[in-house]
Amino acid sequence: MPLKNPNGNIGGRNQAFILERVIDMTRLLNYKQSLVIIAAIILIVGSALYTPYKGTASFATVTLTKYLGYHPFFSPPTPEEVCDAINFLGIVSAQKPQFYYAEVISSRVFIQISAISLVAFGLVLLFSDKKE
């Protein structure tokens, strides 16, 4: 027996309604446009889950920042990786940083997602059916 939601709707009916709406919206697109939208969604999700990081280490006299590359969002670079990247810049390895951390380069993620969206929008317009 399906459980009722607090608002009185039966559990699976809302999901079925949403799926029907999505199917109705895809009928407005042709096959190529649908492929472009699916590819764009996959790329945007990939960009959000596999993000660029930069590492920062602060020593007594200087604060250094270095690009650490792309890492999974839920598994950022470890402090040891940050220290190794900064030590690669020539800092004496015996000197211990006061603090070090890794952070997502959010501006780059925003630019990536914006570029994917704009290209997808352009391709959807390009692949639209020509009306006579």
Image: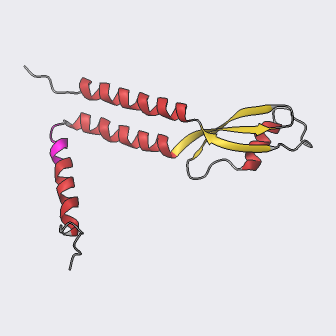
Q: Looking at the image, which is closer to me, 47 or 2?
A: 2
Q: Looking at the image, which is closer to me, 131 or 77?
A: 77
> What residue sits 21% from the left and 48% below the top?
22
| Residue lying farthest to the top in this orientation | 132
In which quarter of the view is residue 114 placed?
A: top left
The colour scheme used here is: secondary structure
| Residue lying farthest to the bottom in this orientation | 1
| Quadrant including the C terminus | top left
In which quarter of the view is residue 45 placed?
A: top left
Question: Magenta includes 29?
Answer: no
Residue 125: x %, y % from top left: 25, 25
Please, is residue 5 above or below residue 107 in the view? below
| Quadrant including the N terminus | bottom left
Range of residues picked out in magenta: 23-28
Q: Would residue 1 be found to the left or right of residue 82 on screen?
A: left
How many marks the image carries: the answer is 0
Please, is residue 68 above or below residue 4 in the view? above
> What residue sits 46% from the left and 43% below the top?
46
Residue 95: x %, y % from top left: 90, 41
> What residue sits 37% from the left and 31% below the top?
117
Residue 25: x %, y % from top left: 18, 42
Q: Would residue 32 be found to the left or right of residue 82 on screen?
A: left
| Residue lying farthest to the left in this orientation | 132
Question: Magenta includes 24?
Answer: yes
Please, is residue 62 above or below residue 104 in the view? above
> What residue sits 58% from the left and 35% below the top?
105
Instruction: Report the magenta stretch's main SS.
Output: helix
Residue 101: x %, y % from top left: 70, 44
